[in-house]
Image (cartoon, grey):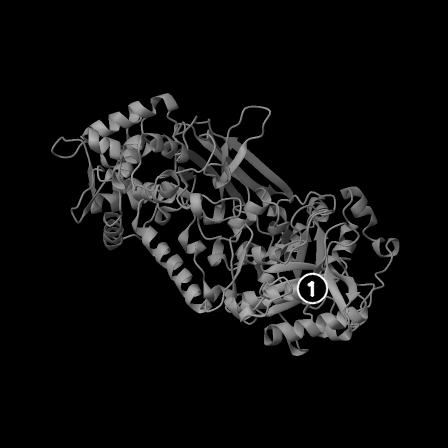
Amino acid sequence: MSPRNSSGIPLLDESKSFSLIFRGAKTLDLMMDEGGDREEILYVLTSIIRQYGLAKLKVGNEVLLLRYVWNDVDRDNSNTINEKEMGELLNRINFLVKEKNHGAVYQKFCKTLALDKANRRNGLTFEQCVTLLHKTKRDTWQVKPVTQLFFDMFGQFMNNNKVRKKVSANSFLTRFLQTVQGEKTKTIEDVRNIFDKLQGLELADVADLVSEKDYISLDHFEAYLLSRDNDIFDPLREKYCRSDMNRPLSEYWINSSHNTYLTGDQLTSRSSVEMYIKALYRGCRCLELDIWDGGKDEYGTPIPIVYHGHTMTSKILFEDIIKSFEVFLMLHPKTYPLILSLENHCSIPYQQVMVAQLKSILGKKLYEPDEASLSGPLPTPSQLRGMVVLKGRRPEGATDDYDTDDDAAADDMTDQQSMRTERSSNTMRAPNSMKIAPELAKITLFHGTKFKSWQESTQSFTYHMHSFSESRVRSLCKHNQTNQWIQYNQTHMSRTFPSGKRVDSSNYSPILAWSTGCQMVALNYQTPDDPLRINDGRFRENGEQGYVLKPSSLMMNADIEPRAALLEVKILSGSCLPKPGGLSHGECIDPYITISLFDCHDGKELVSVQTTNTVMNNGFAPIWNFEDSFHFQVQNMCVAVMQFTVWDKNPSPKPDDFIANASVPISCMRHGIRSVQLFDANNTRSGAFDFASLLVLVKFEHSQAEI
């Protein structure tokens, strides 16, 4: 019998407990009851997830969508859909049929299937509903972009003068992959592998499918266009590259967060250990902790706490946060280093407890630099794999020279004030009188120092680094210090963070800081806005490891002019777009797309936004004005990011609702006819977002070389 409290509730037993982590939502914490086998449950759950992941690769998007909504709309559990349920089904997939027309549509479709009255009353089977979805998409008055493209590339008529319904492997290779898509290295064997996969897909029975080995149908062609294999994000850039992880840390962009513990605004929101887990699973590898003296336990031992100091945000235990890192590394032992940015406001006794907790909880996972490792280049991600690295104060007794976010935020003033006071900043600010415990200094790698001049900074130890507010970033770039900063960042580290004025926890664009080679561009992870989505796109590179090797242009000693390009984009169609938030209820959406280019030039941020027309009442298979072309001038191809965002149009004055998004670095973008795999606000493709995508046409004025 498990121990229980005074109310009869079982006490927590860690050996019987486990958590289901839903990215972007609260975790579900569970504990086995008497006789339960936790390992058996975990094995079953893991097997289900793995098998579903494999099975869905063999199913077309429309079939996946129907499977996802089926149990919700089949309310009587008859395993069929009747006339009333069909109306709910169409609304659920975002295809509007007025309620008064549900009966007529149902009867017309049943007639098409030659169903007698008895079968009509019984309802439509799953397979028949798949056919319904296929016909709903196919039988539109609009010209389908895929059909037009199919005829344009392969010819509308075959040699026997019949309308083309299939295409050969050779034509697919030479007229499509190698020509339109620019995939010059593809071979006929690659095409046969693609065809085998397509012919194994579960599609609608009425689709004009082709079973001949070296041919595919129009429906197969469309399935390929919308598949992940045809994603706009270059799979070679998305793939994890282990050999790229052996350079010093200064040569990487590192996925970083600011005030990681907060769930909302900077003044009154709740602090939560769970935010660290969410950030880690979103790919963050540099996390911030603001640590203060708390109370003492019953034995008089100090309790370090984390919260946003001098605000009404709630407080959490430093120890609990460190435990969450240990659990994450236990589950993911090959994770590249977690860097903890310690904003240390603690007195010496509390710092000593911090050290004891770090060592006892993390053990060998805590990186403790020795004197030999502090001379010369910084360690590499591979050398620090599976470890926790500390950023804080390194020299014993460091005070005056140390730079916290609070100190750096003092630079958050107008550009003119910033440059005018730069030389006298040390005399204007009161020195940081907080002492550093020798025990903590010894286990810290990165030592934050105040910026004085690039010459002095470049000559300092490589483990010395700077922090800059977003305003200081703009100021330094505005005053032509970009090239000096790039040179500094080749061997040293910089961290940037949002302005203290952003009390709503909004974010700044990371593009400008990335263009100077800053490694740790810290963002508020609790706010799903454009800058955070730009960050998601950047760190989709290299297998979402949280470390992306900076482009060679940022690692050269010469002053290199960034590569530019002209870019043309057409939005052709959408597929299986969900309702806002993936909700199962609500009216059919009216989707439109914004295409945004986030760029920089001559030390200034550039944003260009263009918008499609709105398609009314159709998120299932919307078709936009695909004759419309959107043109963009890309100034800095190595850092620019393009964002495709789907919105649901609302009547004024109600703001439009965010539906889904994909952010693609220009350096990772493939040209041609491409699918854009869409992500929800939490950067996941799960649930209703698992099959949501756009079909676009992308053209560069010139071919893309490696940057």
Q: Where is residue 12 drawn, in percent x and y?
A: 58, 66
Q: In the shown orientation, is residue 115 left or right of residue 532? A: left
Residue 132 is situated, as x and y percent measured from the top left of the image, at 28, 34
- Horizontal and vertical percent position of residue 442: 72, 75
- Decide which of 566, 335 is in the foreground and name it: 335
Can residue 98 be seen at all in this image of the molecule? no
Query: Which residue is more in the foreground, 370 or 263?
Result: 263
Residue type at mark 1?
Answer: Phe
Q: Is residue 493 left or right of residue 650?
A: right
Q: Number of callouts in the render?
A: 1
The answer to whether residue 406 is above or below residue 340 is above
Q: Residue at x 41, y 67 (%)?
A: 40
Identify the element where label 1 is drawn. Answer: helix
Q: Nearer the viewer, residue 346 or 224?
A: 346
Q: Residue reaching furthest left?
A: 160
Does residue 490 appear in the picture of this structure? yes
Q: Residues within 10 Å of mark 1 (few under 14, many from 20)?
A: many
- Residue 338 location, x and y as percent? 59, 64
Which residue does the numbered mark 1 point to in the structure image?
Answer: 318
- As drawn, is 6 to the left or to the right of 31? right
Residue occupying image coordinates x 71% and y 56%:
467
> Compared with residue 590, is residue 76 higher up or lower down, i.e. above or below?
below
- Using the image, determine if residue 68 lies above or below residue 706: above
Q: Observer-nearest residue: 701 or 500?
A: 500
